[in-house]
Amino acid sequence: MNTRTVYVPTPDGTALATDVCLPEGAFPFPAVVIRTPYGRDAHRTELRGWAAHGFAALAQDVRGRHGSPGEWHPYRDHERADGAVTVAWVRAQAWSNGEVVAVGASYAAYCALVTALADHGAACDAGPGADLDNFHRDGAPDSLRPDGAPGARHHDGVPDAVIAAVPALGLTETAREPGGPERLWARAGWWAAHGDRRDSDPDALTRALAGDPRLLEHLPVAGLAERLAASLGRELPSWTGLWADRARGRLVALGSTARLPLLAVGGTRDPFAEDTVALWRGWGGPSRLLLGPWGHRLTADPAAPTRARVNLGALYVRWARAALAGRLEPTRHGVIALGDSGRWHSTRPRSTPRPASTQDATAQDATAQDATAGDGAAWWAGADRPEAESRWSFDSPTGLRLLHGAEFDADPDRPVRSDDLAVPAAGERADRCLLLSPPLPRPLDLAGAAVARINVTADTPCADWAVRLTALDPTGRADPLAFGIVRRTGPPGEAADVSVPLGTLGRRLPAGTRLRAEIAGHHFPAHARNPHTGEDPVTATRLAPSRRTVNPRGSALHLPVVARRRYVEPAPEICR
């Protein structure tokens, strides 16, 4: 197998640098296309892997990055147009059988998705409020049978299937939490490494912080690029525009009109896990979800047992073959790993929520765990209700016991740190509300959506509410379990019921584990500090403290307990 570099022409004359690796033997072959801003050279091994399994494999530098000329504007329309041109070019080659799978991770997943949805370009431009039904009034595209399988004809620039791993779905999705707060540390790191340059420097922010430790405290956030430029030796003119886009959900909405198969791959430790789930949940064609115990790099914990590891390359090949052959069931289902236990739980969405259980988890026995799922976990439950929502009250001896901080100060000059799991000892000045559960009497499997519903008060017109859930093993070792943050505006001093989504959990907690919950007003530097003045945190230059109150009697943690264990092997479940 030899890899050669070609240049795919675009209508405006830009030639996109593309590595092509063909299998041994007689063509034609199905093809896999990867379009990336992170350098096509990094995919050489992946291309050979695909080619070894009979796929022509291509990796392309997106416009304006690495070997491709032009200007790169992240998440702009040129990705859709250039992707469509590339897929059409592949189909015109003598070695192609016409079948194309678009594949990508992170930003490359965005490239794959916008290419897969290229037929809906007008809808993409129209935004999330567009009448998407108008784009499929005449039924499925000619290239697809009603069940989503590839047909005899193709739309030249649209792939037949898509694999989207840890997808970065747009400017807003990557820059802000669904609840509003700005993802400061991650965006500063990404822009320092990749923004406004042709190549990448992954360690740029680390070096900048070494020379300027208080860099991320700079105000306003919008002006951070000027201070960062002094460390980087280059300007970041696109930084301000990053925060201007507030439209969320364009690709998820467009995906509801798709008819081609989707494999959505994510990790329960990935910050974009909820976008991965939303994409799978809303996709119009056959869709599969693989949610493993991974972060954004999809790498397993080195200490994890062998049974907890998944050969993603082999699974991708198997799924791609099934998708191209039309062997996937026209349904929406998936699997979620229970941490590093090696156990995978089968799951599928349900459209109709059911009433919540009000039983406290540590008091449940085997029959109580068959309780009906509630709103927070409803979309995970299938017809046989494999997951049940358990309610951990803040005022119950079998739920979460208040240690201290029912009243606390959220001071942006001394924010609760996102990079420190240590908590203040009793008697110290409270900067958060701290709660702790009794030890679990038996192992507990969690799979699905978790949420904290809290009754709270702030004496400022705008307040962020951050909830961090940590698992403490019997020795006291802390392991992050879940996190969520939302922004609320309202009259100062007014009590409010606030729901804080904590993401999708997949974990097996051993007996003896305690759950520790923290409720705070900041989560810095992962998230920008709320100034508490009502000003936009991106442009604010003045910070003020905020006095907070948490009412334990009106608050609870809701966790998705696996009520009926339904363990599966991930590859067969994903590929059926």
Image: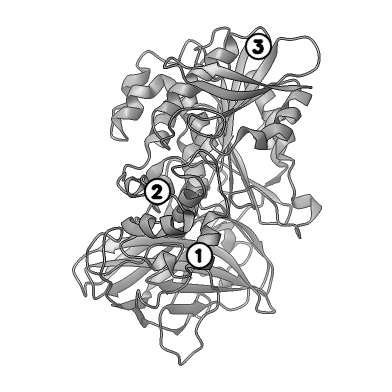
Q: Are marks 3 and 2 in contact (CB under 8 Å)?
A: no
Badge 1 local density, few (<14 within 10 Å), some, or many (20+)?
some
| Vertical placement of residue 508 versus 549, above or below | above
Left or right of 91 in this view: 567: right
Q: CA distance from mark 3 to mark 2?
A: 41 Å
Give the labeled residue for mark 3. 96
Q: Earlier in the sequence, mark 3 or mark 2?
A: 3
Q: Position of residue 397 (x, y in %)?
A: 51, 81
Secondary structure under the numbered disc 2 in the rendered image? loop
Residue that mark 2 sits on: 236
**Type of residue at label 3?**
Ser
* Badge 2 vs badge 1, beta-carbon distance below 8 Å: no
- On the image, which quarter does residue 367 sit in? bottom right
Residue type, mark 2 in image: Leu
Does label 1 or label 3 sit earlier along the sequence? 3
Residue furthest bottom in the image? 427
Q: Quadrant of residue 138?
A: top left
Image coordinates for residue 511, horizontal then vertical, percent: 69, 71
Which quarter of the rendered picture does the N terminus lie within? top right
What amino acid is at disc 1?
A: Leu
Q: Which residue is mark 1?
A: 209
